[in-house]
Amino acid sequence: MDGRGRVFYFASWAGLALGLLLQVRRFPPQGLEVLVHLLLVLWALWAMSRGPKVAPRLLLHPLGAYLLFEMWRMGEGWPLAGFFTPALYLLSGFAYPPWSLGHLLGAFWGGVLVLAPLVWGRNLDAWPHFAVSQAILYSLTFLLARFRELHGQMRFWKEQALTCPLTGLPNRRALEMALEREAARVERGEKPFSLVILDLDDFKKVNDTQGHLAGDRLLKEVAQYLVTHVRQGDLVGRWGGEEFAILLPRTEGEEAMQVAERLRTGLSRLGVTGSFGVAVYQGDLRDLFQRADRALYRAKGEGKNRVERDL
């Protein structure tokens, strides 16, 4: 859950506590009614401790039963309980996927609350408004849950499309998009950036002698090392095969060489050698790729395990 999500999550709990406090002050519980409110509070605290993914399922039925209890306890003031029914439908929407039997539990409780005043023979002046509003609220919540599901699917496929499934790093397409953004910043007057391409030396031997699982494990270890040892703001991605790319924003010439050399030295200490090609952006992204590749192959040709820069 991101920061804004946590804010709204805790705000919902604060609203639940405030609503319960207002209800108790407006309609003070008597006798065993105090026990019902105490049990609800304890249950809500326990549900909250289980986390945001579990809490909605734990609270759905207790909240439905509590609202029914409050409608009965409030007598002719029963319509006031209707202000809290959206929480009931939202719980069902977050607890279960749309069109599932679980999601329909919200409709079940809504139906019970709509029928209760008729069964009890209470004042029905506000009942038509209450009944129609429940149908609208439930329908809107259903649509919200459906949009939430679709958004989750889109986010999943977007992440899959831009992420290397083995290393978890941004893939080549994601790196190209990041490079395009950096190029746009340079056009607006910011300092140029550098591209570093790393190719692991003799990686084919690892696959041939130790197997592909060992090769995959090595790729993941290198990816983890690079991510934890680049500077804040740098971006590491998998360029393809045993190649990695590192985007160094606002970094030129010697500074980019120093970063690449530091990474090369660190990998060597881990028993991994790699050849690095460095190029600085000069106004053309395709030219940047070609120059970084040339520098990489020069590093390979001059003995591997070294850093070269294309001027």
Image (cartoon, rainbow, N blue to C red):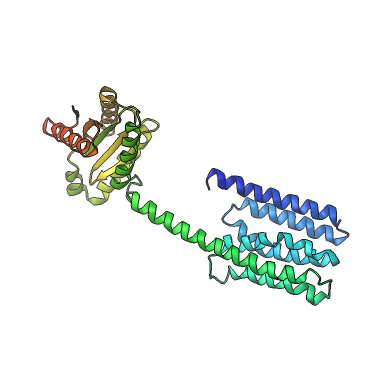
Nearer the observer, 72 or 270: 72
x then y, percent, for residue 157: 38, 56
Nearer the observer, 208 or 166: 166
Q: Residue at x 76, y 54 (%)?
A: 20
Q: Residue at x 69, y 48 (%)?
A: 14
Nearer the observer, 301 or 253: 253
x then y, percent, for residue 29: 85, 58
> In the figure, 125 relative to 88: above or below?
below
> In the figure, 107 relative to 218: above or below?
below
> In the figure, 296 relative to 134: above or below?
above
Question: Would residue 140 be found to the left or right of residue 200 on screen?
Answer: right
x then y, percent, for residue 35: 81, 58
Q: Quadrant of residue 224?
A: top left
- Residue that sits furthest to the right in the current view: 31
Q: Residue at x 17, y 32 (%)?
A: 295
Nearer the observer, 281 or 257: 281
Question: Would residue 245 be found to the left or right of residue 149 on screen?
Answer: left
**Total numbered labels placed on residues in the image:** 0
Q: Residue at x 79, y 66 (%)?
A: 71
| Residue 265 shows in this picture | yes
- Residue that sits furthest to the front in the current view: 188
Q: Quadrant of residue 81?
A: bottom right
- Residue that sits furthest to the top in the current view: 254
x then y, percent, for residue 290: 18, 37
Q: Which quadrant of the rendered structure holds the C terminus?
A: top left
Question: Would residue 83 be found to the left or right of residue 211 on screen?
Answer: right
Question: Would residue 125 be found to the left or right of residue 199 on screen?
Answer: right
- Residue that sits furthest to the left in the current view: 301
